[in-house]
Image (cartoon, rainbow, N blue to C red):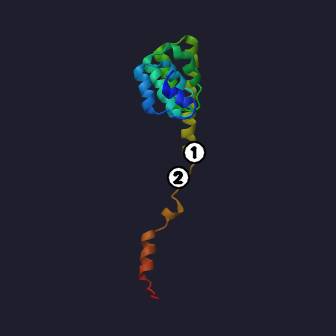
C-alpha cells in the first residue's frame, strides 16, 4: 500500500494534483481507484482522467459509479474514461442517457438565466453621476 494513501486514510494528508500525477506515472491503479472516493470533485476528476489514460479495466466498476456523480465535469470525465477502457452496449445506453441528462440540465440553466432575469441596469448605474458631482461642486464649501 502506498504511504501517501495511508496518510490520507488516517487524515494526515490531503490528496492533491501532484500525488495523483505521481500515481498516474507509476501506474498505481489501486491508489487511483481509492482517489475516486475523495470528497473533492477536482481530485475525483483528476483520478478518473488518469485511469482513462491508463485504460485500467480493473477500475471499470469504480468509474461506472462516478457516472452518476453530482458534478457534471466528473460525470463527463467518467464517460470519456469508460469509452477509452471499452464498454458493453448496456453501459453505452446508460452513457447516452447521462449525456442527455447533462445536456438538458445545461439548456434549462441557460433558459432560466435568460427568462427569469429582466436585464435592467442597477439603480446606481441609472443615475447620472456626472451631473450629481457637478451640482455638488457648484455649492459653496463650508469650512469649520
Q: Quadrant of residue 136?
A: bottom left
Please say if 109 is above or below 135. Answer: above
Count of numbered labels shown in the rendering: 2
| Residue 75 in view here | no
Residue drawn at x 53%, y 22% as measured from the top left = 33
Q: Give how far across and how far down residue 115 sits, in percent.
A: 57, 45
Sort mark 1 into few (<14), some (14-19) or many (20+) by Cα contacts within 10 Å: few
| Residue 9 in view here | yes
Which residue in the protein does label 2 denote? 119
Residue drawn at x 57%, y 49% as measured from the top left = 117
Q: Give how far across and how far down residue 57 sits, in percent.
A: 50, 13
Indicate the secondary structure of the residue bearing disc 2: loop
Residue drawn at x 58%, y 19% as measured from the top left = 94
Q: Give how far across and how far down residue 144 sits, in percent.
A: 47, 88
Q: Quadrant of residue 18?
A: top left
Q: Give how far across and how far down residue 3 sits, in percent.
A: 49, 26
| Identity of the residue furthest to the left in this view | 25
Q: Quadrant of residue 133?
A: bottom left
Which residue in the protein does label 1 denote? 115
Sort mark 2 into few (<14), some (14-19) or many (20+) by Cα contacts within 10 Å: few
Indicate the secondary structure of the residue bearing disc 1: helix
Residue closer to the observer: 141 or 28: 28
| Identity of the residue furthest to the top in this view | 88
Residue closer to the observer: 31 or 144: 31
Q: CA distance from mark 1 to mark 2?
A: 10 Å
Please say if 78 is above or below 125. Answer: above
Q: Are marks 1 and 2 in contact (CB under 8 Å)?
A: no
Please say if 68 is above or below 54. Answer: below
Q: Which mark is residue 73?
A: none
Amino acid at each position: 500500500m502506498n504511504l501517501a494513501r495511508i496518510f490520507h486514510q488516517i487524515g494526515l494528508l490531503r490528496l492533491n494534483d501532484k500525488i495523483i500525477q505521481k500515481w498516474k506515472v507509476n501506474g498505481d491503479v489501486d491508489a487511483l481507484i481509492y482517489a475516486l472516493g475523495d470528497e473533492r470533485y477536482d481530485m475525483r476528476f483528476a483520478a478518473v482522467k488518469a485511469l482513462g489514460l491508463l485504460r485500467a479495466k480493473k477500475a471499470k466498476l469504480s468509474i461506472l459509479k462516478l457516472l452518476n456523480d453530482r458534478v457534471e465535469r466528473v460525470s463527463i470525465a467518467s464517460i470519456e474514461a469508460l469509452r477509452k477502457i471499452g464498454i458493453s452496449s448496456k453501459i453505452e445506453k446508460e452513457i447516452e442517457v447521462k449525456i442527455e441528462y447533462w445536456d438538458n440540465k445545461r439548456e434549462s440553466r441557460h433558459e432560466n438565466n435568460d427568462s427569469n432575469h429582466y436585464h435592467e441596469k442597477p439603480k446606481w448605474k441609472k443615475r447620472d453621476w456626472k451631473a450629481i458631482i457637478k451640482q455638488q461642486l457648484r455649492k459653496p464649501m463650508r469650512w469649520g
